[in-house]
């Protein structure tokens, strides 16, 4: 009621009062602004949003034809990568496919790459195929190295030691390339005489092959052309396959004129068929026999261990022939070496 | 009735009902909308640059800004605000 009276009676005063109230409100709003600005001054954020004239001039957008907004001429940037494997320069977009081929990561490319590495190794022998050592694709070459190492320790006094070292270079790339690695006359004869499909094993002596076959399954895969490096009892391959590969590996060396006279006695080509039959029979028989069998035979011919070892492959019925041959074999170191090699005999 | 007394009475009524806060908020919004705030802010920056960033005080700002602020408020904003207050008072007297 008071207000109504006020409105009605004192209109000019009322107007002044309302103006005063409005001014108060406006002053309060400006006071708020002043506080805000003052705070921004003290905190240091007042001029943050300002435009710096100097940098505005320096970084002004350039609107001319032929250049980008920074005033630079548009140049095509070629991103090039250097292949760590073959040191070639490649466009970045082609790098991954190339690397797949070059490093041998793909399925097919691993074969290509290993072949290439093998060829490189042949060209300069100091570049050993170190890349292959950690390969998941177990290769014959690396396993062979281990065997070679073992043998090398055993026969430090043997003249064959040098040759074994040379093989390591030739084989290290697990190469499928042509066997042009060997340099000595005997080896070239060997490799020339061999027409077997197995690519690199022909350069090994029969001793090396035996050692390898004693340790490993050795079945040559149809796809990779590599030997299985698992143990003799590897479940992937059958006894039949192992027998075949042993037969193949040991037979192919037979016609070769051997200087050292170690294995010429085992077989001749004539009875190869009967030999393989006997061998297979012996394999089955021996798979049931106890390890004591083999040790007893070892003892009986302990003075001629190396022929003994070959008899493990070719069958016990060969012992007569081997005794004949062992008389030819006069090197004392060989008996030592084969004695330790008999440790690697299959137990059955 | 004196002018100051009437002002105090109206003010009390506005504060009691909370209408004063609402009016102030409306005014602030209107002033931001019409660019009053940006104008004042630019003037503040000038003042700060003249006085030096370290030496500026709130009193300096208030003394310089308040008269400018009053002058810069657009007429339509003033009219709207007055109309609001009048409407409020009419509502209060009719109760």
Image (cartoon, helix red, strand yellow):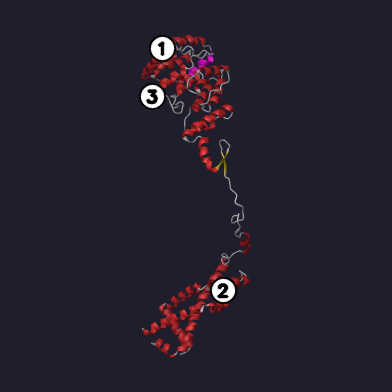
Rendering coords of residue A60 (x, y %): 61, 60
- In the drawing, does residue A73 fall left or right of residue A278? right
Whether B4 is drawn above or below A78: the answer is below
Residue A185: percent from left, percent from top: 57, 17
Determine if marks 2 and 3 fall on one subunit.
Answer: no
For numbered disc 1, what is the local secondary structure? helix
Please give left or right for residue A227 compared with residue B43 in the image: left
- Element type at mark 2: helix
Q: Which residue is drawn at 39% across and 21% down?
A: A240
The quadrant of the image that shows the C terminus of chain A is top left
Give the Cα separation between the discs numbered 2 and 1: 116 Å
* Mark in the foreground, 2 or 1: 1
- CA gap between label 2 and label 3 equals 97 Å
Q: Quadrant location of the N terminus of chain A? A: bottom left
Is residue A137 on the magenta stretch?
no
For marks 1 and 3, the one nearer the N-term is 3
**Secondary structure mostly taken by the magenta-highlighted segment of the chain:** helix
In front: label 1 or label 3: 3
Residue on which the image places disc 2: B58
Which one is in front, A275 or A151?
A275
Q: How crowded is mark 1: few (under 14 residues within 10 Å), some or many (20 or more)?
A: few
Q: How far apart are marks 1 and 3 (CA)?
A: 24 Å
Q: Measured from the top left, where is residue A273 in percent x and y?
A: 41, 14
Crowd tier of the residue under label 2, counting other residues whose Cα lies within 10 Å: few below 14, some 14–19, many 20 or above: some
The range drawn in magenta is A331-340
At a point 47% along the width and 33% down the height, the residue shown is A108
Q: Name the residue under label 3.
A: A238
**A331 and A108: which is toward the camera:** A108
Question: Along the line of sight, which residue is nearer the eye, B74 or A5?
Answer: B74
| Quarter occupied by residue A78 | top right
Which mark is drawn over residue A317? 1
Residue A139: tell me if it is visible. Answer: yes
């Amino acid at each position: 009621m008071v207000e109504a009276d006020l409105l009605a009676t004192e209109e000019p005063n009322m107007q002044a009062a309302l103006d005063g109230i409005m001014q108060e409100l406006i002053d309060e709003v400006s006071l708020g602004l002043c506080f805000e600005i003052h705070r921004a001054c003290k905190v240091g954020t007042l001029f943050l949003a300002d435009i710096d004239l100097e940098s505005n001039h320096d970084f002004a957008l350039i609107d001319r034809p032929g250049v980008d907004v920074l005033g630079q001429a548009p140049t095509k940037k070629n991103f090039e990568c250097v292949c760590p494997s073959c040191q070639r320069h490649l466009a970045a977009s082609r790098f991954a496919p190339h690397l797949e081929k070059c490093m041998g990561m793909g399925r097919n490319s691993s074969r290509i790459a290993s072949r290439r590495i093998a060829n490189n190794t042949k060209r300069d022998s100091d570049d050993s195929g170190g890349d292959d050592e950690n390969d998941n694709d177990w290769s014959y070459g690396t396993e062979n190295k281990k065997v070679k190492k073992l043998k090398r320790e055993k026969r430090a006094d043997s003249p064959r030691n040098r040759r074994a070292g040379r093989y390591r270079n030739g084989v290290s790339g697990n190469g499928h390339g042509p066997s042009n690695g060997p340099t000595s006359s005997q080896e070239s004869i060997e490799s020339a005489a061999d027409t077997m499909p197995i690519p690199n094993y022909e350069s090994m002596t029969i001793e090396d092959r035996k050692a390898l076959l004693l340790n490993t399954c050795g079945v040559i895969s149809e796809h990779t052309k590599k030997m299985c490096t698992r143990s003799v009892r590897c479940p992937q391959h059958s006894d039949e396959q192992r027998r075949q590969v042993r037969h193949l590996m040991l037979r192919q060396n037979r016609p070769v004129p051997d200087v050292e006279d170690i294995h010429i006695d085992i077989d001749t080509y004539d009875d190869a068929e009967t030999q393989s039959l006997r061998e297979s029979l012996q394999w089955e028989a021996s798979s049931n026999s106890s390890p004591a069998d083999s040790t007893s035979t070892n003892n009986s011919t302990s003075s001629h261990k190396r022929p003994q070892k070959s008899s493990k492959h070719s069958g016990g019925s060969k012992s007569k022939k081997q005794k004949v041959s062992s008389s030819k074999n006069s090197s004392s170191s060989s008996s030592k070496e084969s004695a330790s090699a008999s440790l690697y005999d299959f137990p059955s | 009735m004196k002018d100051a007394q009437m002002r105090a009475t109206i003010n009390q009524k506005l504060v009691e009902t909370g209408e004063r806060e609402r009016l102030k908020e409306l005014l602030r919004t209107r002033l931001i909308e019409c660019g009053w705030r940006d104008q004042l802010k630019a003037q503040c920056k000038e003042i700060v640059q003249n006085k030096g960033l370290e030496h500026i005080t709130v009193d300096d700002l208030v003394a310089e800004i308040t008269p400018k602020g009053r002058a810069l408020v657009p007429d339509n904003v003033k009219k709207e605000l007055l109309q609001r207050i009048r409407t409020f008072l009419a509502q209060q007297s009719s109760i």
